[in-house]
Amino acid sequence: MNPPRSILHLDADAFYASVEQAADSRLRGKAMAVGGETRGVISSASYEARALGVRTAMSTAQAKRICPRLILVPGDFEKYERFSRLMFSYAYDLTPDVEVCSIDEGYLDLSKQGQGHPCDSAIHLAKVIRDNLKITISQGLASNKFCSAVASKLKKPNNFIEVPSGTEREFLAPLPSRWLPGIGKKTESLFVGAGLAFISDVAHMPLKDLERIAGSSASALQSFALGIDLRPVIPASATPKSFGEQETFTSNSQDEFFILAVLRSMTDRLCRRLRDEGLAARTLTLRIRYKDMEDTMRSESIHEPSPHESDFYPMLQLLLRKAWTRPESLRLVGVRLTNLHVALPEPELALTGLPQKSATERLQLAEASDLLRRRYGKKAILRGHDLWLRKKLSGGKSSGDSFSDPGKN
Ligand SMILES: [Mg+2]
């Protein structure tokens, strides 16, 4: 039998707000929050603001009502990405086996490291990050990814919990079942109704019965509930996690409408994967390959990270025109989304402003479409460019009859 692994999960506390406090001493110790600009919601609140009831995804109007002294700072996502790179550079000092999951979360596999106990490494890591970056992190150490992630989030901020090998199941048993992967608010109430309020209930239920409630994910869920998770830490070397796709055309193309429709379709799929993992991206990189094999890449970032394809559509045409400067046909195009952040949760309370409402509705619409596609297949919902592409690929007219401007859907 293999010796138990030592997996450390690192999760920065109130990351955006903490970075702002670290960067500006006048904000330290104050009730402050990042957000309010485009969506009218709080992206991250300092612990001083949380103590007064301000929460992530709350509308800024409501936050101001609860806490009139609240200092609002616009998001500076480039600064957060810089801090994130510095933070993970200290993790890489301990081991090359670092999996960066988002801007402020990641796993370290400390099983192989020669020097010292993994607990000492965790304490050291929190200290160097605190001393050098003036932000705090919470960490969980366990024999697998799931338990270490739960341990890091259980008692924030500035905390460290070790789950000794062999105690995973006892550690998880008393926690509400919403701690299991994929159990959101709606699934949680379904679970509670079925007598599965706690992880121990999920662990004990006969698999046949659990399948009736959780479908095909029942067996994976039960493994997690039993404290079993064999997923490896996947080090991404120097490249942080990203989502990308590329496509080689069956025949080289010079048709901008067609190419844009392909790019939009790709962006749709990549954003669906983002949403599946609860992530949002800020930077899109477009790659083209000319028929003579020359490659060109162009990138652009949006101000705030987003999980929605429609936020990336405007930059596709712009980037395509920037990249495609020679009058040559293209052989391949690709899209990659990077600078991944944890997506904002759905707003918690009644909506008070229009920007927040539209953001929520957009997320709900996106989630509903994702669900329909998962249940009824990829073609259950098609956007304008998908229909246009289908028609074109099946030999129909490509003259843009029902799709005169792919930028407008
Ligand atoms: Mg965090």
Image: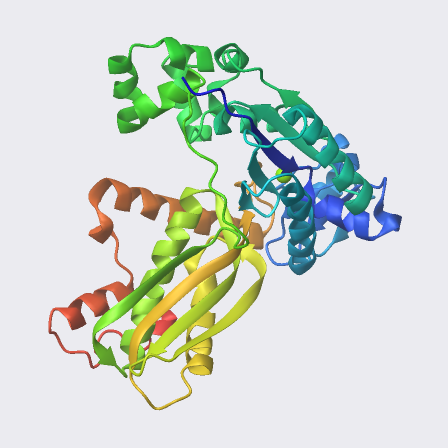
State the residue in front, 264 or 331. Answer: 331
Could you say which is closer to the camera, residue 303 or residue 5? 5
Extreme right residue here?
26
Residue visible at 31% across and 42% down in the picture: 371
**Residue 93 percent location from the top left of the image:** 67, 43
Q: In this view, does 32 lie above or below 387?
A: above
Question: Foreground: 265 or 254?
Answer: 254
Against 176, residue 337 (above or below) is: below
408 on left or right of 172: left
Is residue 327 positioned above or below 240 on the image? below
Whether residue 404 appears in this view of the structure is: no
Residue at 58 percent across and 15 percent down: it is 164
Quadrant where ligand 1 appears: top right
Rendered image quadrant of residue 8: top right
Side (left or right) of 197 relative to 52: left
Give the percent coordinates (x, y) of residue 321.
43, 82
For image coordinates 27% across by 75% down, the residue present is: 258
Q: Taking 155 as reference, is 29 left or right?
A: right
Quarter of the picture containing the C terminus is bottom left
- Image quadrant holding the N terminus, namely top left
Of 43 and 8, the residue lying toward us:
8
Q: Work out whether 314 lies above or below 226.
A: below
